[in-house]
Amino acid sequence: MAEPAERPDDRIVSADRMPGEGADRALRPQGFDEFVGQPHAKANLKVFVEAARSRGEAMDHVLLFGPPGLGKTTLANCSA
């Protein structure tokens, strides 16, 4: 027996913002100059981003890994 078609409002994934989502965005650094810590990783990422901008291309893939609390998500947002 065929299952009924899924309605758009039944989706778990949505592009709509949830209440309170993004509240920490104002607290996170928006650029590398505002980011405190990880000087070696920050310097490498700055070189990658500047090189991609000078070529007028998208930056290659980057994998940030490590334990929680090192700033991986913040560095990814700064790179974006």
Image (spheres, rainbow, N blue to C red):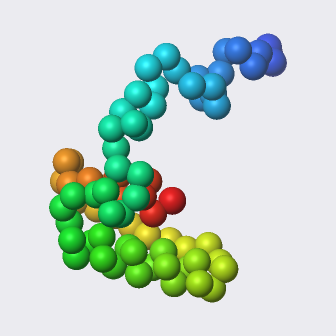
From the viewer's perspective, tell me whether residue 71 is left or right of residue 16: left
Residue at the image point whose x is 49% and y is 16% from the top: 19
The percent position of residue 77, horizontal first and vertical second, equals 44, 54
User: Splitting the image into 4 quarters, where does residue 14 fall?
Assistant: top right
Residue 3 appears anywhere in the view: no
The percent position of residue 71, horizontal first and vertical second, equals 26, 53
Above or below, comparing residue 34 to residue 11 in the picture = below
From the viewer's perspective, tell me whether residue 71 is left or right of residue 17: left
User: Splitting the image into 4 quarters, where does residue 7 fall?
Assistant: top right
Above or below, comparing residue 6 to residue 64 in the picture = above
Residue at the image point whose x is 75% and y is 19% from the top: 8
Residue farthest to the front, as pictured: 33
Residue at the image point whose x is 51% and y is 59% from the top: 80
The percent position of residue 56, horizontal first and vertical second, equals 66, 80
From the viewer's perspective, tell me whether residue 64 is left or right of residue 49: left
User: Splitting the image into 4 quarters, where does residue 15 fall?
Assistant: top right
The N terminus is located in which quarter?
top right
Residue 7 appears anywhere in the view: yes
Residue at the image point whose x is 70% and y is 15% from the top: 9
Total numbered labels: 0
- Which of the two residues, 74 or 33, is positioned nearer the viewer here? 33
- Which of the two residues, 61 or 35, is positioned nearer the viewer here? 35
Above or below, comparing residue 78 to residue 28 in the picture = below
